Image: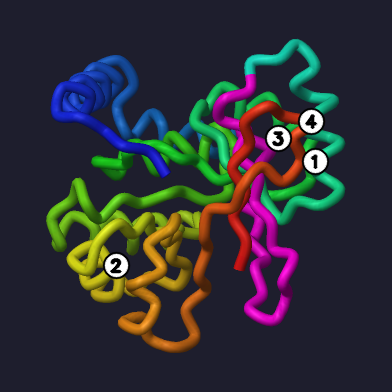
Amino acid sequence: MQVFKGIEIEQIKKAIEAKKQNFDIQWLGKSLAYTPYQPRPLDLKREDSLNVIYSLANSNDENFLFQAKELEKSAKAFIIESLEIATYLRRYISVPLVYDFLILDSYQLLEALVYGTDSVMLYPKYLEQKTLKELSQYALKLGLERIFCIESKEDLTKAIFAKADILNLNKNFSLIPLIPKQKILLSNLQNANPEIFNTLDARIL
């Protein structure tokens, strides 16, 4: 779960607008016809206690692919912060890829699909309720699963109204009594495989 500062958010907005100028959303949509990747389902089951999702966001190791293949044996998905890494991994990794970045615009969702991701993180903290709902609906329309990152009661309320199915609580366990049944809850664990990654986030039901 990432934290975004005001200046970073403004930079992201400017980057989105620049991309729209160079490659508008119609052009991006047409490029889907040439991508070999279709979104894969994020198969997280409430009754499965081994639903581990590894974060590959901080790995710059030259043996990156080898390490990812080793973790793939026990992973239900990988969290990545770079679309370039997503495209690279998609060729070799069979488990779904979750794009963890601040989504502010539907353009980013379409872009994530083109690059081969299967799911996206949505951050209610940084979005108005209407925008969050629209982004959530558009992601579903594209076939992308959504994981809502929850830091507060307000975030939780927004996510529920946006029809969230998967909630990443990080370590905010005090919110659990407020969550409706039948939701899939993810939480942050300590290093699950230190011999593979020096710093590794894992999330499990």
Q: CA distance from mark 2 to mark 3?
A: 28 Å
Q: Is residue 65 above or below residue 77?
A: above
- Identify residue for label 3: 90
Mark 2 or mark 4: whose residue is earlier in sequence: 2
Q: Are marks 4 and 1 in contact (CB under 8 Å)?
A: yes
Q: Amino acid at mark 3?
A: Arg
Q: Which mark is residue 196?
A: 4
- Identify residue for label 2: 159
Q: Amino acid at mark 1?
A: Leu
**1 vs 2, front mark:** 1
| Residue at 18% in and 66% down | 154
The local secondary structure at tag 4 comes to loop
Secondary structure character of the magenta stretch overall: loop
Q: Amino acid at mark 2?
A: Ala
- Return the residue nearer the eye: 145 or 24: 145
Q: Label 2 neighbourhood size at 10 Å, few (<14), some (14-19), many (20+)?
A: many
Q: Are marks 3 and 1 in contact (CB under 8 Å)?
A: no
Mark 4 or mark 3: whose residue is earlier in sequence: 3
User: Where does the magenta region start and end?
Assistant: 35-59
Q: CA distance from mark 1 to mark 2?
A: 30 Å
Mark 3 or mark 1: whose residue is earlier in sequence: 1
Mark 2 or mark 3: whose residue is earlier in sequence: 3
Image quarter (top left, top right, bottom left or bottom right) of the N terminus: top left
Q: CA distance from mark 4 to mark 1?
A: 8 Å
